[in-house]
Image (cartoon, rainbow, N blue to C red):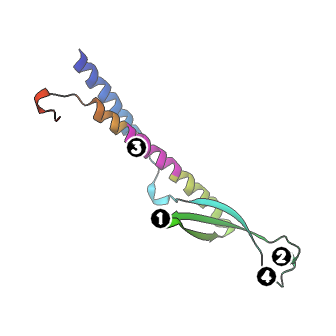
Amino acid sequence: MFDSLCIVNQQVTLRKRDRLAASLPDASDVLRGSLLQRIIRHRSGCPKCDRGEGHPVAVLAVGYPGGRIRQICLRKEQVGQVRRSLAKYQKLKAAIEQICEINQQLLRDEPIEDEGKRSK
């Protein structure tokens, strides 16, 4: 009885993992990083900057090992696509984390067929 219950639970868990994997967004259109709004100011000669207003700019900031950050200035028409790609990355990352958790659960729930084969 216990073995058959374990097998059923394992099959349910496998179906859940397969549904998650099937729902993953297209990975060809993902971006990692943060979308920032910055104000740039020219040193001199710009009336807008002289008044202290500056120029708003959207920036994609991406962190790399060693504390290095790459910043990419975006055109206004790119901001919407970048925002969508960042959201897809977060959705993809969350789904992968869930799949990893399910795979760990499957490892813990794996039925042991022969107690003698178990490593100590």
Q: Position of residue 34 (x, y in %)?
A: 60, 59
Q: Earlier in the sequence, mark 3 or mark 2?
A: 3
Give me the C-alpha separation between circle 3 and circle 2. 51 Å
Q: Earlier in the sequence, mark 1 or mark 4?
A: 4
**Residue range highlighted in magenta:** 90-101
Decide: few, some or many residues near mark 1? Use Cα within 10 Å; few <14, some 14-19, many ≥20.
few
Residue under label 3: 22
Q: Earlier in the sequence, mark 3 or mark 1?
A: 3
Amino acid type, residue under disc 3 in the picture: Ala
- The stretch drawn in magenta includes residue 26: no
Residue 46: image tag: none
Residue 35, by quadrant, is bottom right
Quarter of the image with the C terminus is top left
Q: Earlier in the sequence, mark 1 or mark 2?
A: 2
Secondary structure of the residue carrying tag 3 is helix
Question: Mark 1 or mark 4, which is nearer to you?
Answer: 1
Question: Mark 3 or mark 2, which is nearer to you?
Answer: 2
Give me the C-alpha separation between circle 2 and circle 4. 8 Å
Residue 49: image tag: 2
Seen at 56% across and 60% down, the residue is 33
Give me the C-alpha separation between circle 3 and circle 1. 31 Å
Residue 65: image tag: 1
Q: Position of residue 46 (x, y in %)?
A: 83, 81
Question: In screen coordinates, is 47 left or right of 2?
Answer: right
